Image (tube, grey):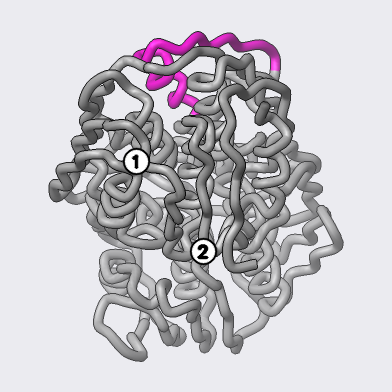
Amino acid sequence: MTFLDLPAARRASGSVRLPGSKSISNRLLLLAALARGTTELVDLLDADDTRVMREALGRLGVGIDGSRIEGVGGVFPVKAADLFVGNAGTAIRPLTAALALSRGEYRLHGVPRMHERPIGDLVDALRGIGARIDYEAGEGFPPLRIHPGSITLDRPVRVRGDVSSQFLTALLLALPLAGGGRIAVDGALISRPYIAITLRVMQRFGVQVTRDGWQSFDVPAGPYTAPGRILVEGDASSASYFLGAGAIGGGPVRVEGIGADSIQGDVRFTDVLERMGATVTTGDGWIACSGTAPLHPLDMDLNHIPDAAMTAAVLALFADGASTLRNIGSWRVKETDRLLAMATELRKLGAEVEEGADYLRITPHPLNRNVAIDTYDDHRMAMSFSLVALGNVGVRINDPQCVAKTFPGYFDVFRSILQ
């Protein structure tokens, strides 16, 4: 399918069961693979990003039978592998660190966009402790060749924190394999809630990291120990689209599988909704939202919820004044340059957009009709802009199948709440 036309709609209401969180799913898959014992992952996300992780782990000698993962109890037993990871940052970054400590010969590569996404800060950190990693093409970018190294952890591992939190996550997950050590973060650490997820899932597998603020982390030695059965939360980033639909389409729209006590940072998208004038209610394992356009304009630092911030950018089209989304520079190195892509598509719809190095200022105007949204092979572009249909204009989404990265059935579910 090259495009999908969503019909004009005025209202949204109903209930949606969320797929499992991508961020949690791929972390759990890796830790279950490295642990001693068997882990059952209930409600594990089944999408492109988790499939490439599962396939890579299988090629590395991990026993995977449906939702049951038979851990290898340490480093990977297979010492030579060629691994394709698509465009999954939550796969390539942690795998790079784990493989650098596994004393084998490995190649990691993905789709062309993956080869444009930076990984140099992680590679530099790993080289600093004795890892041997080469770039096949551009310096600082995949594909990577990983060779056996001599790892020494007699001094802190240093890593930058201002490009992607996934570099720190990768080191945190891998260091127990080498006997533990200290990680020092240089500069400000972005997307801190994602590090909080990492620390929580490590704790579930028996490794308790201590930290000094967000600049220093002491990681104990492994091994990881399988906890038995783990339920994967619903995806908080995916929840934002349905909650946003409730905010502009009357509602209530209720998402199930995640509550206010979620370990995912994107659950705080509810703060955005409330600031924009919507009503949010929560219960045991669910969140609901209702409201009507026009919404209040938003001026907010959204560094802590970079994925859900894309939903806020589209909701700005439904505000009664200009909104400013701040501290979102990490958008530049995601599945596409999301700052540029978002500004381009918002302008198509009639908005006036000022694009800065790490912010967007969005002044809404009446929505243009018959707009075709380009999605840049980015699932979150496709899902965010689906909300435009609730402006009673309808919208064409080009390359809708890109949502398979994290939510293969998204458009069917989304259309089920439109009225």
Task: Examine the image and state in which quarter residue 217 appears.
Answer: top left
Q: Residues within 10 Å of mark 2 (few under 14, many from 20)?
A: many
Q: Name the residue under label 2.
A: 88
The residue located at (71%, 22%) in the rendering is 14
Q: Is residue 262 left or right of residue 115?
A: right
- Spot occupied by residue 63 in the image (x, y as percentages of width and height): 80, 68
Task: In this rendered view, identify the residue nearer to me: 144 or 306.
Answer: 306
Task: Examine the image and state in which quarter residue 155 appears.
Answer: bottom left
Q: Is residue 260 left or right of residue 228?
A: left
- Spot occupied by residue 51 in the image (x, y as percentages of width and height): 68, 65
Image quadrant for the C terminus?
A: top right
Identify the magenta region.
267-284
Task: Residue 330: tell me if it is visible.
Answer: no
- Spot occupied by residue 181 in the image (x, y as percentages of width and height): 38, 53
Q: Name the residue under label 1.
A: 191
The residue located at (76%, 47%) in the rendering is 41
Q: Does the magenta stretch include residue 358?
A: no
Q: How crowded is mark 1: few (under 14 residues within 10 Å), some or many (20 or more)?
A: many
**Would you place residue 391 above or below residue 26 in this image?**
above
In the rendering, which numbered label is found on residue 326? Answer: none
At label 1, the amino acid type is Ser
Element assignment for label 1: loop
